Amino acid sequence: MSILDEIVDRTRDDVKRRRKAVPPEQLRARLKDRGDDRPFAEALASRPGVSVIAEHKRRAPSAEHELRTGSTVEEVVAAYQRAGATALSVLTDEPFFGGELTDLAKARGASDLPIIRKDFIVHPYQVLETAVSGADALLLIVAALEDKDLAKLYRKAREYDLDVLVEVHDGEELERALEVVDADVIGINNRDLRDLSIDLNRTFELLSHVPAGKVVVSESGISRREEIEELERVGVDAVLVGSHFMRQDDIEAACRELAAL
């Protein structure tokens, strides 16, 4: 069993428990209290150069310890905004990444940037959670979903006016993302979620197969301004950076360096 299989199985069990604790109808009643829209995809596409999606991430399966201690969600996302990030990513998976769903509301209260919920979304209940918890977009990982589930979850997200970052890491997954949902925002993950290896060349290899007009995000393994400049040269619209920022003593300076402010 790969790490992705393990995470998805655990996620399905966790969703069952959460649905019993808070039934869907209770969540739907909270939809009326959603705040103003902060268009995620539009923010990435409208900024000149490469946008930085800065991530709050406590832990990673490949790390033995927390990536950062002593900083609150609010402090981290406020630093990202001051540093020139275009959008925020908030990792809410708890068992493997130490995140919490409540981190979304905390981030929204501390910043006016659009927020994507980064998690392993496998059930429509999670889409509803996302809509009522302060996010403007969510992540769908093609490797974790059958085509019918990918289509259903994408459609449900759009019903709730959530933007969707559809993540792929090889040519077959890219083909599915385009054929099944015609994704507007495509994330190319340089990390293989099956074995956690990282290869930045994945972005360069897949980019030429992405149709014109799509917003392309390069994810994972990015830590230097030179890498972002090369990604900009080939037409990448945004990068998602988490672990690199969260490990830095001065998180604002690290983000500012990559955002070129």
Image (tube, rainbow, N blue to C red):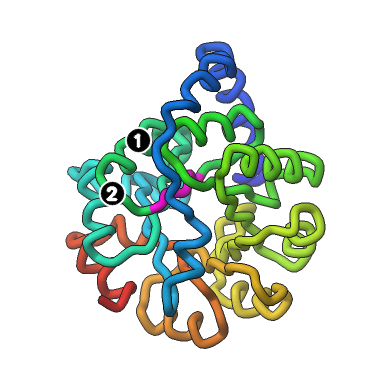
Per the image, the residue denoted by label 1 is: 105
Q: Which label number is shown at residue 59? A: none
* Side of 111 where 119 appears, left or right: right
> Of the residues under marks 2 and 1, which one precedes in the sequence?
1
Q: Amino acid at mark 1?
A: Ala
Q: Nearer the viewer, residue 2 or 166?
A: 166
Front residue of 78 and 218: 78
Where is 230 relative to 180, above or below? below
Question: Residue 231 location, x and y as percent?
Answer: 50, 80
Q: Is residue 256 left or right of residue 90?
A: left
Residue drawn 70% across the image and 51% down it: 143
* Position of the N terminus by quadrant: top right
Say whether residue 25 is visible.
yes
Q: Which residues are magenta?
A: 114-118
| Distance from Cα at disc 2 to Cα at disc 1 | 10 Å
For the point 22% across and 41% down, the residue is 72
Residue 111, disc: 2
Q: Is residue 117 magenta?
A: yes
